[in-house]
Amino acid sequence: MHLIWLRTDLRLHDNTALTAASQRGPVAAIYLITPQQWLAHDDAPCKVDFWLRNLQALEQALADVNIPLLIRHADTWEQAPGVLSQLCRELKVESVHVNEEYGIHESRRDSAVARALEADGVTFHSYLDQLFFQPGSVLTKSGTYFQVFSQFRKVCYTRLHSALPPLVASPKAQAVLDLQSDAIPTRVEGFAPPSESLRALWPAGENEARRRLDAFADEQISYYKDERDFPAKPGTSQLSAYLAAGVVSPRQCLHAALQSNQGEFESGDIGTITWINELLWREFYKHILVGYPRVSRHRAFRPETEAVAWRDAPEDLAAWQQARTGLPIIDAAMRQLLETGWMHNRLRMVVAMFLTKNLLIDWREGERFFMRHLIDGDLAANNGGWQWSSSTGTDSAPYFRIFSPLSQSEKFDSEGLFIKHWLPELAALNKKEVHNPEAAGGLFGVADYPRAIVDLKKSRERALAAFRSLPSRQEIAEHE
């Protein structure tokens, strides 16, 4: 008997560890419910619910090839070695197979499990699956991890041209085992179930993920570069939650994109090229997680920015969290997050820059809040995005580049359609007034919409002063 330990790879097709395990003989699948670990990692209730719903869909798909899915509980990952060792003894398991994960806690967990199993004579096998390239295999000429995306991308393109990662064959049906699948829990203590309206936005299962991918590649991808920045348009793939849970693989995404562009990476359809770049951004941030583990420890990628004098401003933070900053584009974006578990990527940058620059509140507050609400919450991508916006990370926006929420709003939601959808109390304002009701003269107080909590010009100057006063990276290095 062989075991596939499922984590963020909740799919039957193109699943490297699952196929490898099934090729060795009879295989069963195991998934661990780890509520205290999920709480410690700020996993959102809607994300946990999404995992459970996808497990139910996967259980059906596995049943079609006679692979039972077992559920075990381990409050934290520290208990995983004991729980898995016990199961392996019960089932007389010869080998356990996993797809690699990359956070610092994930790496420690897998090392501990491997040691425990090997002490019992069970072999532990891990596979590259959620990335195109093994972290540590895409390096600068001096042998270090890339810190600049454009240079990383260039090497990736060269490697992909010479060897495209192939899709993995799906496991064939095996003989029926004398082992029953376990019931999938519908909820986990500590994680309130989301609204039915939120669930309806994110149907579970590989078939839905594939439907979205095919529809995007067939109908939308060509417009992606032109439309992805406009939150009122359906310009994005809506696949991020499925990628984060591993319901669809990055290889499947890459192959679908290339198929729509006659196999080209750097020429042909500009929308396809732009979307492939986004897959490589995802890759880049996971490599950063391995190469610079401090980002897993709530540390700034740029050490000198640890000295930023962030404000302790609980009332401002609460206003941002609760979508009552008085700046419509910020509040509309935050309502989208609270009600759907997702936020448009352009707006993720806008609200992050507003929190870290205009409110001068520590990026870690925003990172944590996002993780607690995002259905597509992913440590590497979320941390990378927050550190980019706050000018503390890799390839980050220079500290003096501070998005104005008003100009972003006017540029990317010029008709105010997105704002009015999420802030219906502003529906009566015209397309000029809706971006800044306070400046609309006499219209202030529409449906009790709040005044702006901060002066954008003065707060921008405050942020510039806070960053200008930082020691240089060289000075930091000399004191370490």
Image (spheres, rainbow, N blue to C red):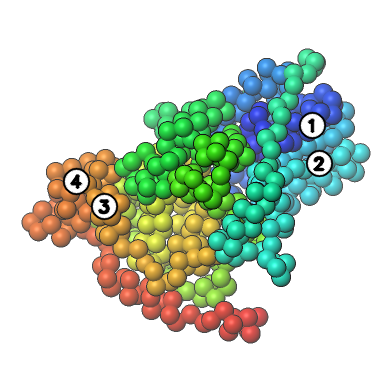
> Could you tell me how far apart the alpha carbons at marks 2 and 3 are, in whole angstroms?
50 Å
Q: Quote the CA–CA distance across marks 1 and 2.
A: 9 Å
The residue at which mark 3 appears reads as 328
Q: Are marks 4 and 3 in contact (CB under 8 Å)?
A: yes
The residue lying at 67 percent from left, 63 percent from top is: 145
- Image quarter in which the N terminus is found: top right
Q: Residues within 10 Å of mark 1 (few under 14, many from 20)?
A: many
Q: Is residue 388 left or right of residue 250?
A: left
User: Which amino acid, by three-letter code, is at mark 4?
Assistant: Leu
Kind of residue sitting beneath label 3: Pro
Please tell me which of labels 4 and 1 falls first in the chain: 1
- Residues under numbered marks 2 and 3 in contact, where contact means CB atoms less than 8 Å apart: no
**Disc number lying in front (3 or 1):** 1
Where disc 4 sits, the SS reads helix
As drawn, the label of residue 125 is: 2
Separation of residues labelled 4 and 1 (CA atoms): 56 Å
Quarter of the image holding residue 97? top right
In screen coordinates, is 307 left or right of 90? left
Residue 197, quarter of picture: top left
Q: Which residue is mark 1?
A: 21
Residue at 73% in and 48% down: 109
The image's mark for residue 426 is 4
Q: Is residue 194 above or below residue 448?
A: above
Label 3 to label 1: alpha-carbon separation:
52 Å
Which residue is located at x 38 percent, y 75 percent? 464
SS category of the residue bearing label 2: strand
- Callout 1: helix, strand or loop? helix
Nearest to the eye among marks 4 and 2: give it.
Answer: 2
Q: Earlier in the sequence, mark 2 or mark 3?
A: 2
Whole-percent x, y for residue 48 in the image: 55, 37
